[in-house]
Image (cartoon, rainbow, N blue to C red):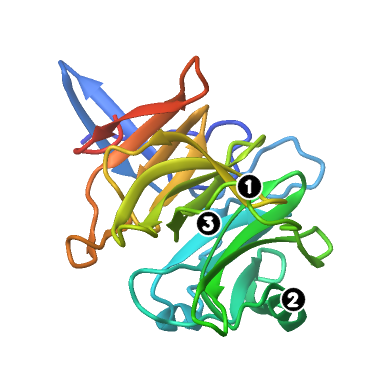
């Protein structure tokens, strides 16, 4: 029996944690949960508090959602409803306050939906940029056509519409996943609107015009994939495939910007090395 004592990295603020060991060419990894540890010497005497220690409750609303994306903003956690091939219509997002220890339902302002001509919301994905939580809403108009608009929530909770002009280039995918590297917004994967199947395209997006610019391609096409950004790299996993009868897409992709600014990467079938 070997007992290890490990410490979370300085500045750690929540997320997946694991301990990895290697010996003689063999390697193993186990997910862990760090307990609260007194920092010692502090004036308040408080213990460290991490998101994974908070026993984050699962909101009942998720039982009615086909999928969701979690995004952190202004100290809170937001749950955003995602499309997974069903026709579920959404009316709200959820926000969890670590201070209040509860989820709150936040309705998308009806006046903004009316302004954008959206009568049904089928998907919401989001990422933080320039001090706001930027949301990409995909829905349907009264004419039954698809509509995409970008909205934002500021630190005071106020909503605004960001898309103020028609895209300069045609939108070619729906239901991609929005993520930020702190400087730009990216949309990964989705459904190709012309072919009706999953897309491997990666775009940067200007939320004020909605104009997409292709900057790379995934190894595996995915609808509503899970995407995270860390240490200059994008990690992409999950998502579904229309050509595989909405089955989950396997493997993890790791992409980084090349010298030309295009995202380049590889598919890791077994997991993140």
Image check: 241 left or right of 56? Answer: left
Quarter holding residue 28: top left
Residue 136, placed above or below residue 27? below
Q: Residue 37, percent across and down? A: 57, 44
- The label shown at residue 168 is 1
Q: Mark 3 — residue?
A: 53
Crowd rating for badge 3 (residues with CA inside 10 Å; few <14, some 14–19, many 20+)? few
Label ID, residue 115: 2
Residue located at (56% from left, 61% from top): 54
Distance (Cα) linking label 3 and label 2: 41 Å
Residue 227: % across, % down: 44, 47
Is residue 140 something that shows in the picture? yes
Q: Name the element at disc 3.
A: helix
Q: Are marks 1 and 2 in contact (CB under 8 Å)?
A: no
Q: Can you say which quadrant of the picture contains the C terminus?
A: top left
Residue 151 higher or lower than 4, as above or below: below
Q: How many marks?
A: 3
As measured in the structure, the alpha-carbon distance from the residue carrying label 3 to the one carrying label 1 is 46 Å
Give the secondary structure at mark 2.
helix
At numbered mark 1, what does the secondary structure look like: helix, strand or loop? loop
Q: Position of residue 61 (x, y in %)?
A: 50, 82
Q: Is residue 90 left or right of residue 156?
A: left
């Amino acid at each position: 029996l070997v007992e290890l004592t490990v410490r979370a990295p300085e500045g750690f603020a929540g997320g997946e944690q694991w301990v990895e060991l290697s010996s003689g060419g063999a390697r193993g990894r186990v997910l862990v949960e760090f307990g609260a540890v007194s920092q010692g010497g502090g004036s308040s005497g408080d213990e460290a508090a991490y998101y994974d220690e908070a026993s984050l409750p699962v909101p009942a609303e998720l039982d009615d959602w086909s999928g969701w994306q979690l995004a952190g903003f202004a100290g809170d956690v937001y749950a955003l409803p995602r499309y997974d091939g069903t026709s579920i219509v959404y009316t709200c997002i959820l926000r969890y306050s670590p201070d209040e220890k509860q989820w709150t339902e936040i309705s998308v302002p009806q006046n903004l939906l009316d302004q954008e001509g959206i009568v049904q919301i089928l998907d919401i994905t989001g990422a933080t940029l320039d001090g706001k939580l930027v949301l990409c809403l995909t829905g349907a108009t009264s004419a039954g056509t698809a509509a995409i608009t970008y909205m934002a929530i500021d630190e005071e909770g106020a909503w605004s519409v960001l898309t103020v002009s028609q895209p300069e280039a045609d939108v070619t995918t729906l239901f991609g996943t929005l993520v930020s590297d702190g400087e730009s917004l990216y949309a990964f994967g989705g459904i190709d609107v012309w072919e009706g199947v999953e897309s491997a395209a990666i775009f940067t997006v200007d939320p004020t015009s909605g104009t997409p610019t292709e900057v790379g391609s995934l190894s595996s096409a995915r609808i509503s994939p899970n995407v995270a950004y860390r240490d200059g790299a994008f990690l992409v996993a999950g998502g579904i495939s229309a050509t595989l009868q909405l089955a989950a897409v396997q493997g993890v992709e790791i992409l980084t910007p090349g010298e030309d600014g295009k995202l380049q990467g590889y598919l890791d079938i077994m997991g993140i090395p």
